[in-house]
Image: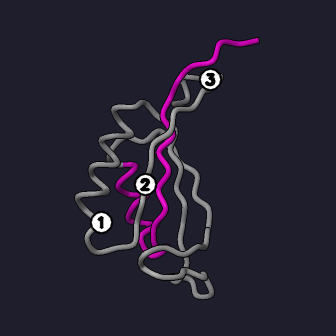
Amino acid sequence: MNTLHTRCLLTIVCEALLETRIESDLKRLGAPGWTATSVRGEGDRGSREGHWENDGNVRLEVVCGQELAERIAVHLHDRYYRDYAMVCWLSEVKVLRPEKF
């Protein structure tokens, strides 16, 4: 078996209307790539059903180094948390192709 390498998974769940802005931030901050999916749920800011284009939530996932993940998380907190429904968390993951992340 190939050697597994540790990386960080940054998961961001936010209002769908922020997707383009967050993707621009990720690119500018040096994220090697990301995956975006439409999601729905409920939290302290109410239910997000996703019946309208900007009514739902989006989940963006970035696999990268710990330092970069923390820098992105701090940026998101400082720029968006006060005014928008957004959460993010970091998890340790193992990857087979470390050069991609």
Q: Tags 3 and 1 in contact by the CB under 8 Å rule?
A: no
Q: Which residue is mark 2?
A: 88
- Asked if residue 8 is positioned above or below residue 11 in the image, the reply reads above
* Disc nearest the viewer among 3 and 1: 1
| Mark 2 residue element | strand
Q: Residue at x 43, y 54 (%)?
A: 88
- Asked if residue 29 is positioned above or below residue 81 in the image, the reply reads above
Residue type pointed to by label 3: Arg
Residue 2, located in which quarter of the rendered image?
top right
Q: Which residue is mark 3?
A: 97
Q: Position of residue 8 (x, y in %)?
A: 48, 34
- Asked if residue 86 is positioned above or below residue 55 in the image, the reply reads above
Q: Tags 2 and 3 in contact by the CB under 8 Å rule?
A: no
Q: Position of residue 97 (x, y in %)?
A: 62, 23
| Residue span colored magenta | 1-27
Question: What mark, if any, has residue 80 been given in the picture?
Answer: 1
